[in-house]
């Protein structure tokens, strides 16, 4: 079975077993690659001789070096090679579509970086037609803030794709989390580093801290020692165009009133 998937300037053509790819094709139907974008080929191959998986593939961290990322664990052997524009995953037949989806997420992160974009751990909220990337480490409140932002569209409550364009940067919805509404992209207006607090206020995040926090929320590529300097340089360039704030908030939707007052 063939699955075609892409966001902005990314594109993957995935060949694999129907039982793995058919559920993904139904759920990911909104993300069809543009015809002009050259896809990477991805092979997802059953490996009945492998031992059965002992844990989901998402518990395996990719090991990356110079844009070549490998994933090795019981029941799985995968590689994403940016230098060749190709990826493969061999998996025991007991693997699930969720395992395949995780591998494709890793592949997307590598391809996006190679082509000038970034996959980013953040909740993307479209508020008054502006895109806000609400980010922070696990437990900082991304999903909570996204829920409190109703009825504003939520591109995703966990992972966004950031892509450069002539106007600056655009944030795109991904299928790797929960969404609300049918909006698939929005111009990126600001980064909001979420901090749970008793009072609601917004302050600029100091540049050094902002750089470290943004980079640490860049999955896959931040763990590649050869690519890390470019990860940092790319974020420095983004920060020259897009402001970064600390948003202290509590569990109520009034924080958007503060954001509107402070950021316009």
Image (spheres, rainbow, N blue to C red):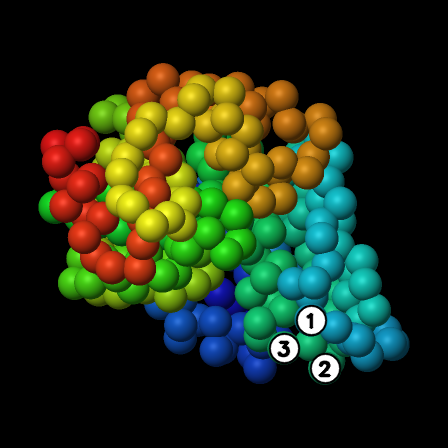
Q: Nearer the viewer, mark 2 or mark 1?
A: 1
Up the image or down, 45 lies above or below 225; here it is: below
Q: Quadrant of residue 28?
A: bottom left
What's the mark number on residue 94?
A: 2
Quick one: SS at disc 2? loop
Question: At x 75% / y 35%, what residue is drawn?
Answer: 65
Check whether the beta carbons of the residues at disc 1 and disc 3 lie within 8 A of each other.
yes
Check whether the beta carbons of the residues at disc 2 and disc 3 lie within 8 A of each other.
yes
Mark 2 vs mark 1, CA separation in Å:
10 Å
Q: Quadrant of residue 110?
A: top right
User: Badge 1 is on which residue?
Assistant: 56
User: Badge 3 is on which residue?
Assistant: 96
In the image: residue 223, left or right of residue 157 = right
Residue 221 point in image, percent of width and height? 61, 38
**Label 1 Cα crowd, 10 Å radius (few <14 / some 14-19 / many 20+):** some
Residue 24 point in image, percent of width and height? 48, 71
**Label 3 Cα crowd, 10 Å radius (few <14 / some 14-19 / many 20+):** some
Q: Depth check: give the residue in front, 181 or 91.
A: 181
């Amino acid at each position: 079975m063939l699955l075609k998937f892409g966001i902005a300037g990314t594109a993957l053509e995935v060949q694999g077993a129907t039982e793995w790819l058919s559920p993904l094709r139904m759920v990911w139907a909104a993300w069809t690659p543009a015809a002009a974008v050259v896809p990477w080929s991805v092979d997802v191959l059953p490996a009945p001789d492998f031992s059965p998986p002992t844990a989901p593939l998402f518990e395996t961290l990719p090991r990356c070096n110079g844009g070549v990322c490998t994933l090795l664990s019981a029941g799985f052997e995968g590689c994403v090679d940016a230098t060749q524009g190709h990826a493969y995953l061999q998996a025991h037949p007991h693997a699930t579509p969720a395992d395949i989806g995780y591998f494709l997420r890793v592949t997307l992160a590598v391809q996006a970086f190679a082509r000038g974009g970034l996959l980013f751990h953040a909740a993307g909220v479209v508020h008054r037609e502006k895109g806000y990337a609400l980010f922070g480490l696990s437990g900082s409140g991304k999903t909570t803030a996204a829920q409190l932002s109703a009825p504003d569209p939520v591109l995703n409550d966990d992972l966004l794709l950031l892509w450069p364009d002539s106007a600056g940067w655009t944030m795109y919805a991904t299928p790797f989390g929960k969404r609300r509404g049918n909006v698939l992209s929005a111009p990126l207006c600001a980064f909001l580093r979420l901090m749970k607090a008793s009072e609601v206020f917004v302050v600029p995040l100091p540049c050094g801290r902002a750089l470290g926090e943004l980079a640490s929320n860049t999955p896959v590529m931040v763990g590649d020692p050869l690519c890390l300097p470019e990860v940092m340089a790319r974020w420095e360039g983004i920060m020259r165009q897009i402001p970064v704030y600390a948003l202290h908030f509590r569990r109520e939707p009034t924080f958007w009133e503060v954001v509107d007052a402070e950021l316009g």
